[in-house]
Amino acid sequence: MANMWAHDMSERMRMRRKVIARDSGLGDTDVGTFPSEGATHTLIEKGVSPLTAMLMAGAMGVAGAGGYSLLNNNSVTSGDNSVTQPPKVSAPTLEPIDLEIEVIGGAEGPVIKGVVPINADQ
């Protein structure tokens, strides 16, 4: 399948170069392929032994686990290796208060005339 795709792409590129050459005023010349020499293929026949593959996989697993544990360390340590935590700050709680609001109607709409707290401990 890959060979068919590569052949199709090379044929499309050849046709494109031929159209560009004709539009540039070179006439109906055969533009050939680029590069003019064929492609080289390198085949490596020797594989890795299963024992070497298992040893490499184990070494990469140990290295990955060590790196993960170093990156996943959430504690902040000082020089004496004691764990320090930031102090917890609690937000102040506000008690709701009842208000008496006096609203009067005006030419521009409602207008607030006064606001008085009811049963406020102040």
Image: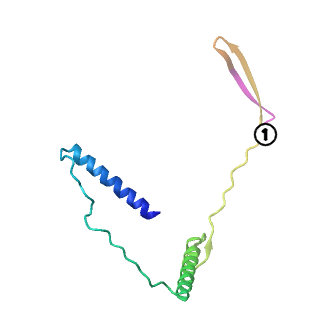
Compared with residue 114, is residue 87 higher up or lower down, i.e. above or below?
A: below
Q: Position of residue 103 (x, y in %)?
A: 72, 20
Instruction: Name the residue rendered at 57%, 79% in the picture.
Output: 61
Q: Residues within 10 Å of mark 1 (few under 14, many from 20)?
A: few
Q: Main secondary structure of the magenta part?
A: strand
Residue 38 image offset from top left, x and y in percent: 30, 68
Q: Is residue 114 magenta?
A: yes
Label 1 belongs to which residue? 121
**Residue under the image location 56 percent in, 85 percent down:** 54
The residue at the point 45 percent across, 85 percent down is 46
- Tell me the colour scheme of the image: rainbow
Count of numbered circles in the view = 1
Indicate the secondary structure of the residue bearing disc 1.
Answer: loop
Q: Nearer the viewer, residue 68 or 42?
A: 42
- In the rendered view, tell whether residue 38 sits above or below residue 112: below
Q: Residue furthest right?
A: 119
Q: Is residue 84 above or below residue 20?
A: below
Q: In the shown orientation, is residue 5 left or right of residue 85?
A: left
Residue 74 sits in quarter: bottom right
Q: Position of residue 64 (x, y in %)?
A: 55, 76
Quarter holding the C terminus is top right
Give the percent coordinates (x, y) of residue 73: 59, 72
Q: Magenta stretch: give its range.
A: 112-122
Closest to the observer, 62 or 32:
32
Q: Is residue 109 above or below residue 15?
A: above
Q: Is residue 102 left or right of residue 34?
A: right
Q: Which residue type does callout 1 highlight?
A: Asp
Q: Nearer the viewer, residue 40 or 79?
A: 40
Rendered residue at 70%/14% (across/down): 105
